[in-house]
Amino acid sequence: MAHSILDGDVFRRLVLSARSYLGARKKEVDSLNVFPVPDGDTGTNLYLTLSSAADTLSEKSGLTLSEASEMASHGALMGARGNSGVILSQILRGIARHFQGRDSVTAPELCGALDEAVTTAYKAVMKPVEGTILTVLRGLRDGATKAASSHDLSSILGSGLKEAKAVLEHTPEMLPVLKQAGVVDAGGKGLVFIVEGFLEGLSYEEVREIAVGESPVTFPAPSKGSFRVEELETADIRYPYDTQLLVTLHDSSPDRLREDLTPLGDSLLVVGSGGLARVHIHTDRPGDVLTACLTHGTLSDVTIDNMIEQSRDMAKSSSPATAAGGPGGLASPEQTGGAPGATGSASVLPPSLSAAVNEREARETGIVSVATGQGLKDIMKSLGCDLVIDGGVTMNPSTAELAAAVKSVAAKKIIFLPNNGNIFLAAKQAKKLVGRNMYIIPSKTIPQGISALLSLNLNEDMGHNLKRASKALKRVKTGEVTYAARTGKFGRHVMNQGDILGLIDGKVELVGDDPVVALKEIVRRMVKQGDEIVTVYWGQDVDEETAAKASEDLEAMLDGSVELEFHSGGQALYYFIISVE
């Protein structure tokens, strides 16, 4: 069936078909995880992100191409999970940008949309790596461009798919870790499946339900407003004035405003919706920022915070309230009292607790963290976390869930600890949506997150706290004892599925068959001269008797050379998590 025109209804069918097609194959993508330990699943993250995009379109018809692509982009951003999901959301963002204002396009216009998708996706990643989904995306664009003279969408997508598959097969040559594991890139494979799903959608008038045994995935309803986003950097204290305002644009655009503000500071964000733009920038010249904005329109809701002021009035602060949140029970933005201009966030708290939070007077600074396991959550709450989101290993919280968690905390500024490298990109996207200052401490492990928490002193200014937390991350070493999720080779180690693995700072150091033996050997290798304390968090698969015996064995082995602490973490998948400082 030939399609020469891409309109809103056809675009909708492509997205819904791709969701169904990927849903039937996401486990295949999950199996390509390079790292042999249990980890966030690329196929599942891509599927949940695409499902969020599809849900915004599922009950719609008669949309223009511009409307359909913008809604899909919005939905993907709000539901983005893991790095792969965030990149997918940016692919759809680029496509929506290209189709902005268009009711429909001819088939060759798809090539331009894919080119914009490449540009936007690469910008979303701080240090792009070849041999990943990005490289496969570029192959998709290049292959489609070769067929740009065709007037059939299937021919153009088919040509793109052929090139994308060829690039995918070469990803092991680009990334040694893929070659060593004998797999292709998981994100790239997922993208290939999505494109195959697009082609499936062009072959039928109705979406075929391909996935079997899948439970329906529900997501918060999307906000009606449209928005544009740009990559946001982390805070830089060289620019001490955190400046935020709304600009009602007069004969201007967010892009032109962004261009004028770029030389004036760092961490620049200009989010536009209609004739209104929200500006966020860290600068050492806030007066110049306001003057520049005045040349583009009228100003309102101006806030300027000095991030390096020497003291804060904490007299009105109460003890940090604690609550463990999860990804369920999302409420609408209206229910959460979202800030004007923030889009699509929702509450992860029960209604009664959300109401209590909203009634509290906002404090200066709050803390939000991510962890799984009741023991770890309790420890983080005891160290001052206002909210601990459930997640981090096999289920990464979405952009919407992270934004909702931040907005549910009654504080003007939020310190956020992801405690997992696969959550970092989603956190950066959430930062653009929360309508307040959100400072991301790039903790990649639970020990790093706890060490950072211990370093914070909310009576000091934000600049000092960020520096102290950064030093804490570098100071701590992380060890883990888990099991091999699949048979394979990693580095010099060959392992069978179910073998016990010992890791130090993310690298496999030993393969064995006894978690306690592995624990002792990992601790022995981690502890060096000058280290002062070893903390072990045992998981849900370790009983108290085994934990007590392991503690006794370590006490004897360390012989008082360092302080030893044992805590019940309750985490899944990891028998032991070890912190050495």
Image (cartoon, helix red, strand yellow):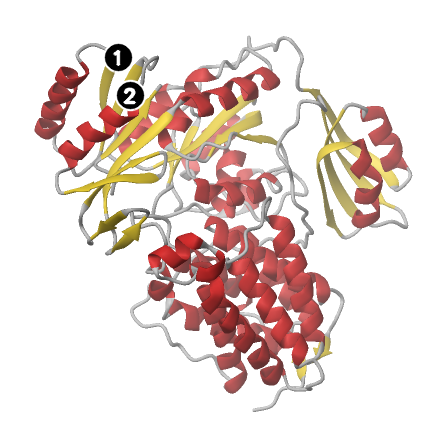
Residue positioned 66% across, 79% down in the render: 146
Residue positioned 46% across, 55% down in the render: 175
> Is residue 268 left or right of 442 when viewed as pictured?
right
Q: Which residue is mark 2?
A: 527
Disc 1/disc 2 C-alpha distance (Å) = 9 Å
Q: Quadrant of the C terminus?
A: top left
Q: Amino acid at mark 2?
A: Val
Q: Quadrant of residue 515?
A: top left
Residue positioned 60% across, 60% down in the render: 91
> Is residue 243 left or right of 348 when viewed as pictured?
right
* Residue 17 seen in the current view: yes
Q: Residue 35 versus residue 418: which sits nearer the camera?
A: 35
Report the mark closest to the observer, 1 or 2: 2
Q: Quadrant of the N terminus?
A: bottom right
Position above or below: 82 against 454: below
Q: x%, y% of residue 575?
A: 21, 36
| Residue that extends furthest to the front in the rendered view of this protein | 492
Q: Which residue is mark 1?
A: 562
Q: x%, y% of residue 215?
A: 33, 63
Q: Residue 464 versus residue 133: which sits nearer the camera?
A: 133
> Is residue 456 left or right of 281 when viewed as pictured?
left
Badges 1 and 2: C-beta atoms under 8 Å apart? yes
